[in-house]
Image: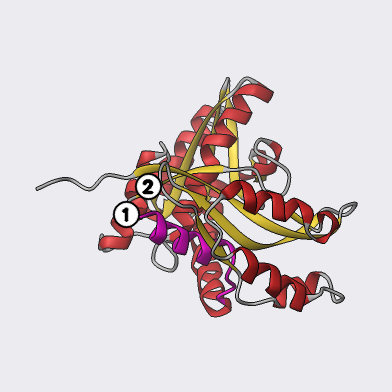
């Protein structure tokens, strides 16, 4: 039987930017480019975030633009229409690489991640992630190293402006930076993909700007049932060389940190 393989794709986001000086934006569209075939376009179906950012936003004009390019098959035409619309009020982000078995399904998944606002699920994810984070904080505090660690390491320092990801904490050992991020796979397996998309750029940025080698560990729940989605999330983390540890592993990680930082 023939094995189904991931293909290398790229995607970029379409952003509504009402004020070029403030450079605040809302993602309203996504374009995924497979190595062959037509691009996959997805658009926001909810303008509430746009209206929250800009109460004067012309939603009807945005909807008309969405309808105009939703069926466009030429990415160059899409970009030209973006540039020609809204006096630079619409902008295309830098492209990112991704792997996909099905470009259409991957575009759907990315659209859910970047364009939709599932409020209840977000609340659950934050609560589950917070519990992991507090366990991580508690163990590093127990070994006396929490206050020595960098907190909320902004990915935008190493990737590009506007990247919202912040890695929870980390510390440097000579030329190696060990970073840790609470990642709830029970509540939202897309959290793994968010890390996977940003980590290669973070690592490259650290090498270029600081001359350091990055190591990222995702801290996940104990006792995960490795069903299809969880297995895929774990495989994605492994593929992008992100280590995985569970809450039960935190005491050993904290002891290692204490030893490497000279507390033992």
10, 263: nearer the viewer: 10
Q: Secondary structure at mark 2?
A: helix
Q: How many marks?
A: 2
Q: Quadrant of residue 242?
A: top left
Picture coordinates of residue 9, whole percent (x, y): 45, 44
Q: Is residue 78 visible?
A: yes
Classify residue 30 as left or right of residue 196.
right
Q: Which span of residues is magenta-colored? A: 102-118
Q: Main secondary structure of the magenta part?
A: helix
Picture coordinates of residue 166, whole percent (x, y): 63, 49
191, 161: nearer the viewer: 161
Badge 2 is on which residue?
Answer: 236
Picture coordinates of residue 253, whole percent (x, y): 44, 41
Q: Is residue 143 visible?
A: no
Residue drawn 58% across the image and 49% down it: 75
Badge 1 is on which residue?
Answer: 232
């Amino acid at each position: 039987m023939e094995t189904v393989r991931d293909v290398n794709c790229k995607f970029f986001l379409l952003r509504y930017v009402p004020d070029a000086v403030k450079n605040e934006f809302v993602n309203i569209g996504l374009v995924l480019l497979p190595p062959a075939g037509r691009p996959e376009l997805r658009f926001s179906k909810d303008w509430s975030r746009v209206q929250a950012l800009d109460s004067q936003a012309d939603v009807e004009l945005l909807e008309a633009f969405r309808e105009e390019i939703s069926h466009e098959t030429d990415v160059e035409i899409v970009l030209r229409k973006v540039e020609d619309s809204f006096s630079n009020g619409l902008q295309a982000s830098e492209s990112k690489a991704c792997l996909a078995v099905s470009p259409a399904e991957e575009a759907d998944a990315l659209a859910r991640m970047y364009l939709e606002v599932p409020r209840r699920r977000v609340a659950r994810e934050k609560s589950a992630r917070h519990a992991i984070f507090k366990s991580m904080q508690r163990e590093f505090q127990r070994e006396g190293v929490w206050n020595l660690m960098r907190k909320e390491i902004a990915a935008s320092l190493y990737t590009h402006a506007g990247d919202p990801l912040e890695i929870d904490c980390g510390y440097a050992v000579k030329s190696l930076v060990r970073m840790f991020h609470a990642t709830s796979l029970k509540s939202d397996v897309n959290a793994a993909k968010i890390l996977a998309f940003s980590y290669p750029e973070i690592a490259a940025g650290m090498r270029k700007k600081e001359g350091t080698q990055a190591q990222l560990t995702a801290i996940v729940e104990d006792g995960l049932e490795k069903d299809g989605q969880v297995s895929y999330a774990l495989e994605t983390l492994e593929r992008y060389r992100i280590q995985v540890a569970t809450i039960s592993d935190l005491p050993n990680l904290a002891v290692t940190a204490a030893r490497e930082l000279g507390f033992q």
